[in-house]
Image (cartoon, helix red, strand yellow):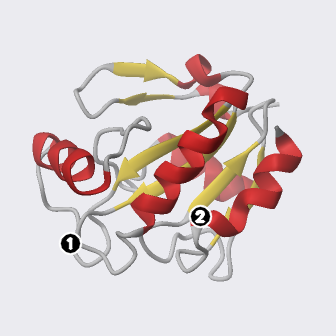
Amino acid sequence: MPSIYDFTAASLSGEEVPLKRFEGQVLLVVNTASACGFTPQYRGLEALYREYASRGFAVLGFPCNQFGAQEAGTAEEIGAFCAGKYDVTFPLFAKVAVNGAAAHPLFKFLKREKSGLLGSAIKWNFTKFLVDRSGQVVGRYAPTTKPEALKKEIEALL
């Protein structure tokens, strides 16, 4: 059975990261953007990461410029913005496409495993996918779902 651990993704610094590196952890995979109405969710994502990291939890942020060109910056600008404005310490990856023919294979997998209200397409930035310790997608949450609203689901998987 395929899992999230079958994929690799480039980090914000350009290093190829096998997602197998996160094997055994509960993950929240999020497509992010720096100039979106939902951008303040970085605060909540970071709070979840800090609260649960010691118990085997990680947030994986994937910047995406497909929605309203709200992530137009370079990798360096994205990193500086996230660290400077929201003190983000969870792993950030290189900018990806999440929809269409050029969608990153990870997001094709995530969408196939858990479709949303509009079918498999991701509607906007800050769509969240919750992954259990075995690498299976167990939840998909809309951009309007605040990170702190996921505590119960995360705790149940830890």
The x, y position of residue 2, in whole percent, is 75, 32
The residue lying at 71 percent from left, 62 percent from top is 150
Residue ID for mark 1: 69
Q: Residues within 10 Å of mark 2 (few under 14, many from 20)?
A: many
* Quadrant of image for the N terminus: top right
Would you say 33 lies left or right of 8 here? left
Question: In front of the other: label 2 or label 1?
Answer: 2
Q: Residues within 10 Å of mark 1 (few under 14, many from 20)?
A: few
Q: Secondary structure at mark 1?
A: loop
Q: Between residue 113 and residue 52, name the one nearer to us.
A: 52
The image's mark for residue 147 is: 2
Q: Secondary structure at mark 2?
A: helix
* Quadrant of image for the C terminus: top right
The x, y position of residue 38, in whole percent, is 40, 75
- Look at the picture and state if 75 lies above or below 32: above
The residue lying at 61 percent from left, 75 percent from top is 145
